[in-house]
Structure formats: structure tokens, C-alpha cells
Image: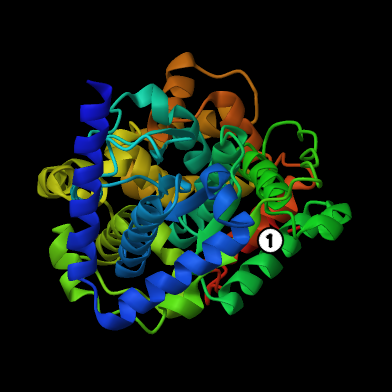
């Protein structure tokens, strides 16, 4: 029975390969053959290819889909020619959260490539602060996102509620941390395969080294060719940025330098072979064009950033036009639109209320509450009479308990966190790391407006 099943599976795999090759252009098939040669050399020969495990971080653009299709074709081609073929671990990434549409597209692609039932393929996804098996329906439990929610709120209040800071370069640290988690349970991953051009990789490496120097980890510079060490160090930076008000944690431990994770770059094979309309048709998906100038953007979802930008714009327009922001009126006008919009899904999933988002955008508690009076005046005029008590609560002085509860409800943070934000109680190296992250957007470009930087600068 087992032999019959194996024969049936081999027939299915052969059909998948034939369908893939049929939908590839002649140039794409030539690139796939060159890819096979590169993988065989990296493995040490065809006799070792069965022990070779490739790791790929899978984005939601055309280049990612093209790479995955070529890798699958290479895996099945080698299986027909040799006793064994390489194993493949695919990590789906779309931080801060994967949309349902993206999950459906990935599931459709995996199904067309017959990857979900292949023991040689492992499909994973990033969910909150964890790496879990791929599934089309993400976990809706708020507890899953509790750590990400707290990190978002604290970082946002420290950086003046700037959307580009909250969903900017700090997401790269989250991606590196997730990559580190994958490596910890990789069962001996041999190599990471990437389409990111060399210039982009060097720019990312330079940014990483600068972040580590600001955190006082200059001693790690000699091991940067070890990708596992770099990911571990960036994971430590993410923990520092997520909890900048806590006591500093110990620096990242050094990865084993005797077994470094190799990087196999294939951008030279596939960058000029992107006539992938037939491949997209075969995979059953329609994907956005890739942006070569920002290859890492394929691993991020911009819906949350766009939602915060829109909400911030509405706040600013209402403040200028009306002179006072009526939350009740605004909620009736926009709550249905926000709840129905895909742009709000991560924020809803994280358990944030509309009032907490408005509070986050105004960031009224930082720098000894310099913006608290204006926030109360425009957003919560009924609390004007309690303004002195709000300051007393944030200073740690005695005040009515309902005032303390209001602060926690409106912000989503604990009173201890609010006191630390109010007093700018953030030590080194967290202060330098947060300031550096606040200066760069998701594409690692310097922001034209660095309004958030003075609050956290040394």
C-alpha cells in the first residue's frame, strides 16, 4: 500500500513539474537550470543534496512568487534525477500582520505547487511574536498579540505618535527576530536563499551595524558574516525597542561560528527574467509588481501604516476646522468604515480601541505631559476639570482612583508605563536605539520630519 501511495505521489509531483515548465518562458527554464547547478554546488554535490535544507522568507510580491515557483521546479527536477532532493522551509512574512487576502493567495499558490502535502516542504508564518505552521485562518486570540500591542503603544507614545516610526524600521527588527526563531528550530538549515540585490543587502547590513553600535554592541562587528549571529543580535535589539522602559536585558549570545548559515543570492539569475504572467496564471494569483529599489518591502504589509496615516490626517483636519474634536461625532461617522476596512484589521486584532488609537496619535503623556492639556481640550473636554489630578497620577502622587482608571483605559497602558513615559524614565542604550529607529521609515530612509526625535534624544 505504501508503494502504491509513493507511486501516486511521484506521478502527482511529475504533473506539477510539467505544468510549471509549461508556464515558464525559455529564459525562465534556463534560469531554473542554473539555479539547480548553484544549489548542487552549495550542497557539495548530488550525493549530499538530500541533506541540504533551504530557508526562504516568502513575501507577497511577484518576485517572491517567481522565486518560490523556480525553487519548487528545481526541487522536483532534482528528485527525478537523483535519489533525493533538498528540503525547503518557507516562512511567510507580511508584518505587522498577514491579511486574509494574502493568506488566501499563498494557500492557492502552495496548493498549485502541491507543497502542503510534501514532507520535503515545511510551511511557516509569522503571527504576533511567534513563528507557527502556516494556516489560512490566523489566530484571533488577543493574548497572541498582547506583547506586540504593548510594544506598539509604548513605542508610539515615546515617538510622538508618528505612523512612520511605529510601523517603520522597527519592523525590520521584528522580522530579524522571527528569522532567529526559525533558525532555533530549523533542524540544521543549510542556507538562506534570497532575491535581494547585493546593494540592498549591504545597506541593510550597514543599518544593522549602526543600530548595534548605538546599543553598545560594537564587539559583534567581527562576526557579521554569520547570519545567525546577526539575526540573534537584531532580535535582542527588538526586545530592547519593545520594552525600552524596562531594565536592559543581557546582550545577545554569540551564535556558533563553526556552523554559519550561508546565503545563496540568486538575484543575478532571476532579476531580468520576470515575464511571469503565465506563472501567475498557473499559480492562480494576481500579485503587485515588485519594487527593486526596496526589495525588503515585500515582507511588510502597509495597511496598518495607511490606516494610522488616515486617522492622523482626520484628527488634524478636524482640529483645524472645528477647533475641538468631538469623539462621539467622529466615532459615528467613521467607526463603520474603519471596522469594515482591511486597513484596520491588525489594530482590531491587537485589541486596540478607537480612543486608544487617537490617544496614541496625540501622544499626550511624553515629556512630562506637555501635550496633555491640548489632548484633553480637543478630545475629552469633559476631563478638563480633572487635569491637575491627571498630572498628579502621572507623577505618582495621590489622586482619585477613577482618574487612574481613565488614564489606563484611554491609553491601553498600565499606570507604571504611563509614569515612566511621563518622566522620560528610559535608560541607555534604549534611548539611543529608540531615537535611531524613530528617524527611519519602513524603507530605512531618513524621515523628512523628525518631530519624534527630540523626545527620545540623548
The residue identified by callout 1 is 208
Asked if one can make out residue 159 in the rendered structure from this viewpoint, the answer is no
Q: How is the image coloured?
A: rainbow
Which residue is painted at 50% across and 31% down in the image? 147
Q: Residue 32, percent across and down? A: 38, 70
Q: Quadrant of residue 399?
A: top right
Residue 78's place in the image compared with 53, above or below, is below
Q: Residue 241, percent across and down? A: 63, 45
Asked if one can make out residue 33 in the rendered structure from this viewpoint, the answer is yes
Which residue is painted at 32% across and 82% down in the image? 27
Query: Would you call the spot at circle 1 few (<14 residues within 10 Å), some (14-19), or many (20 or more)?
Result: some
Q: Which residue is at the front of the view, 101 or 187?
A: 187
Residue closest to the far top: 401
Residue 338's place in the image compared with 392, above or below, is below
Q: Is residue 413 left or right of residue 278?
A: right
Q: Which residue is at the front of the view, 66 or 381?
A: 66
Q: Is residue 233 left or right of residue 402?
A: right
Q: Is residue 166 left or right of residue 450?
A: left
Residue closest to the far right: 219
Which residue is painted at 68% across and 54% down in the image? 227
Q: Residue 417, percent across and down? A: 59, 31
Give the secondary structure at mark 1.
helix
Residue 382's place in the image compared with 160, above or below, is above
Which residue is painted at 75% across and 46% down in the image? 259
Q: Is residue 102 left or right of residue 388?
A: left
- The N terminus is located in which quarter? top left
- The C terminus is located in which quarter? bottom right
Residue 369's place in the image compared with 45, above or below, is above
Amino acid at each position: 500500500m505504501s508503494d502504491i501511495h509513493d507511486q501516486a505521489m511521484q506521478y502527482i509531483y511529475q504533473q506539477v513539474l510539467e505544468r510549471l515548465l509549461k508556464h515558464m518562458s525559455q529564459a525562465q527554464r534556463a534560469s531554473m537550470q542554473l539555479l539547480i547547478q548553484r544549489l548542487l554546488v552549495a550542497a557539495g554535490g548530488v550525493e549530499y543534496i538530500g541533506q541540504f535544507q533551504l530557508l526562504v522568507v516568502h513575501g507577497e510580491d511577484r518576485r517572491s512568487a517567481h522565486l518560490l515557483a523556480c525553487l519548487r521546479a528545481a526541487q522536483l527536477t532534482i528528485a527525478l534525477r537523483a535519489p533525493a532532493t533538498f528540503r525547503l522551509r518557507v516562512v511567510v512574512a507580511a508584518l505587522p500582520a498577514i491579511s486574509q487576502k494574502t493568506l488566501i493567495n499563498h494557500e492557492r499558490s502552495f496548493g498549485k505547487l502541491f507543497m502542503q502535502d510534501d514532507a520535503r516542504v515545511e510551511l511557516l508564518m509569522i503571527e504576533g511574536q511567534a513563528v507557527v505552521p502556516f494556516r489560512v485562518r490566523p489566530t484571533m486570540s488577543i493574548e497572541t498579540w498582547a506583547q506586540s500591542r504593548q510594544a506598539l503603544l509604548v513605542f508610539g507614545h515615546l515617538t510622538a505618535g508618528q505612523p512612520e516610526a511605529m510601523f517603520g524600521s522597527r519592523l525590520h527588527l521584528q522580522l530579524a527576530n522571527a528569522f532567529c526563531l526559525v533558525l532555533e528550530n530549523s533542524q540544521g538549515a543549510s542556507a538562506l536563499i534570497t532575491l535581494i540585490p547585493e546593494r540592498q543587502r549591504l545597506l541593510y547590513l550597514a543599518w544593522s551595524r549602526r543600530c548595534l553600535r548605538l546599543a553598545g554592541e560594537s564587539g559583534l562587528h567581527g562576526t557579521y558574516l554569520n547570519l545567525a549571529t546577526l539575526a540573534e543580535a537584531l532580535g535582542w535589539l527588538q526586545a530592547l525597542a519593545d520594552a525600552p522602559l524596562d531594565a536592559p536585558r543581557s546582550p545577545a549570545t554569540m551564535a556558533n561560528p563553526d556552523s554559519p548559515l550561508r546565503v545563496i543570492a540568486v538575484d543575478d539569475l532571476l532579476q531580468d527574467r520576470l515575464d511571469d504572467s503565465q506563472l501567475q496564471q498557473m499559480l492562480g494569483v494576481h500579485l503587485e509588481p515588485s519594487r527593486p529599489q526596496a526589495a525588503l518591502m515585500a515582507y511588510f504589509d502597509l495597511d496598518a501604516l495607511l490606516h494610522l496615516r488616515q486617522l492622523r490626517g482626520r484628527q488634524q483636519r478636524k482640529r483645524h476646522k472645528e477647533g475641538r474634536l468631538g469623539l462621539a461625532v467622529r466615532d459615528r461617522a467613521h467607526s463603520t468604515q474603519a471596522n469594515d476596512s482591511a486597513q484596520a484589521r491588525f489594530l482590531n486584532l491587537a485589541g486596540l480601541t478607537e480612543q486608544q488609537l487617537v490617544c496614541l496619535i496625540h501622544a499626550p503623556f511624553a515629556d512630562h505631559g506637555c501635550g496633555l492639556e491640548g489632548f484633553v481640550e480637543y478630545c475629552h473636554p469633559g476631563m478638563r476639570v480633572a487635569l491637575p489630578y491627571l498630572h498628579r497620577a502621572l507623577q505618582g502622587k495621590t489622586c482619585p482612583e477613577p482618574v487612574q482608571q481613565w488614564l489606563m483605559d484611554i491609553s491601553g497602558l498600565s499606570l507604571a508605563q504611563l509614569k515612566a513615559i511621563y518622566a522620560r524614565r528610559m535608560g541607555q542604550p534604549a534611548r539611543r536605539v529608540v531615537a535611531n529607529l524613530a528617524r527611519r521609515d519602513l524603507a530605512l530612509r531618513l524621515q523628512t520630519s523628525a518631530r519624534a526625535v527630540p523626545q527620545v534624544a540623548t
